[in-house]
Image: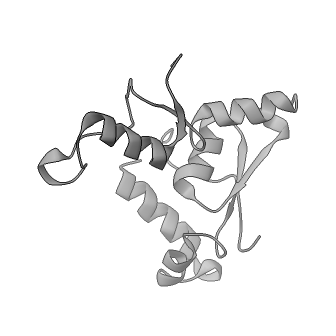
Amino acid sequence: DVGLPPMPGAIGDAYERVLLGVSGKGEDEVKIGESSDLVKRIGKPHSEVYELALGRQSVRGGNALMVGDALETDIIGGMNANIDTLWVVKDGIHGPDVDDVGGYDDGGAEEMLKKFNEGKGYTNGDDVVRPTYTVPNF
């Protein structure tokens, strides 16, 4: 990672496509970002962002809480860093999807989590995305 330009995920993916000379669509589609030697990813869900945040404050994971609305970045990132997570459902990006499957108060959050895990192929107990806590609103 030494000497690689640090970039957040989507920007890093776009930059990597430019470096590789591919569009990422159709025949040019390649797996970008997961095992790259071209760009160092920073930001959620990558562990370095949590290490930096906790290290600067001399906080251990057991005394921290990752609060966020996105399962893919916020909740998975917190889980990977061994930090308790709080999923904010209705105010977040998954709010409309939760409403489509019954709403927060009628089991929609649980159904959304189930669909998210199934869609990602997370079936093993260690892989399953499960926030420590959920709340409807910020």
Q: Residue furthest top?
A: 2
Q: Taking 70 as reference, is 56 above or below it? A: above
Q: Could you tell me residue 4's position as x and y percent?
A: 49, 23
Give the total number of marks visible in the rendering: 0
Q: Taking 13 as reference, is 57 above or below it? A: above
Residue 60 showing in the rendered view: no
x 63%, y 62%: residue:
69
x 65%, y 81%: residue:
105
**Picture colour scheme:** one colour
Of 32 and 131, nearer the camera is: 32
Q: Is residue 34 left or right of residue 50?
A: left
Q: Is residue 82 left or right of residue 10?
A: right
Of 73 and 89, nearer the camera is: 73
Q: Taking 107 as reference, is 60 above or below it? A: above
Quadrant (top left, top right, bottom left, bottom right) of the C terminus: bottom right
Residue 97 showing in the rendered view: yes
Q: Could you tell me residue 31's position as x and y percent?
A: 28, 39
Q: Could you tell me residue 68's position as x and y percent?
A: 68, 58
Q: Is residue 20 left or right of residue 38?
A: left
x 20%, y 46%: residue:
29
Quarter of the figure with residue 8:
top right
x 63%, y 30%: residue:
48
Q: Is residue 104 left or right of residue 1?
A: right
Of 57 and 37, nearer the camera is: 37
Q: Could you tell me residue 87's position as x and y percent?
A: 67, 60
